[in-house]
Image (spheres, grey):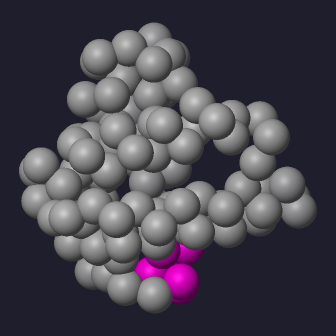
Amino acid sequence: MLKAIIRFVVSAIVLMIVGYLVPGFSVAGFWGALISAIVIALLGYIVEAMLGQNISPRSRGVVGFIVAAIVIYVSQFIVPTIHATILGSIIAAFVIGLVDAFIPTELR
């Protein structure tokens, strides 16, 4: 349980940093970023359950990247503290993918 909490807090911090760096993507405050991290994780889980693990952003393929961008874009319609354009979602998915490459999910 503690590991999951730490994982979501780190994901929220990453979302806040990405929101600061990426034009067309913003998250309002830490609590908004935390809720966004949870929603993005749930949407990713649902997509992975429906389409299989090969579609996951963890697969590091182009399809996984596109799915991650779509999940980020769709999450703005669920969480009002996120604003993302299509290009902002694509850039955010790329930056988050880079962060995941250096800090794998298993370590968070």
x, y percent for residue 103: 68, 40
In the rendered image of this protein, does residue 45 appear above or below residue 92?
above
Q: Is residue 33 magenta?
A: yes
Residue 62 percent coordinates (x, y): 29, 17
Find residue 6 and report its horizontal and vertical position in percent.
78, 62
Q: What residue is shown at x 34% (from left), y 43% (from top)?
A: 93
Pinpoint residue 92: horizontal percent, then vertical percent: 32, 50
In the rendered image, the vertical position of residue 9 relative to residue 4, given as above or below: below
Drawn side of residue 16 relative to residue 13, left or right: left
Query: What's drawn in magenta, residue-wise?
Result: 30-34
Instruction: Report the predominant secondary structure element of the magenta stretch.
Output: helix
Q: Nearer the viewer, residue 32 or 25?
A: 25
Q: Residue visible at 28% across and 61% down?
A: 22
Q: Is residue 80 left or right of residue 12?
A: left
Q: Is residue 27 above or below residue 37?
A: below
Residue located 53% across and 85% down the image: 31
Q: Residue furthest left?
A: 86
User: Which quarter of the figure is the N terminus placed in?
Assistant: bottom right
Q: Using residue 38 as the reference point, say whether residue 88 is left or right of it.
A: left
Q: Is residue 71 visible?
A: no
Q: Is residue 103 visible?
A: yes
Q: Quadrant of residue 61 in the image?
A: top left
The reply, left or right, for residue 24 in relation to residue 18 is: left
Instruction: Give the quarter of the image for residue 102.
Output: top right
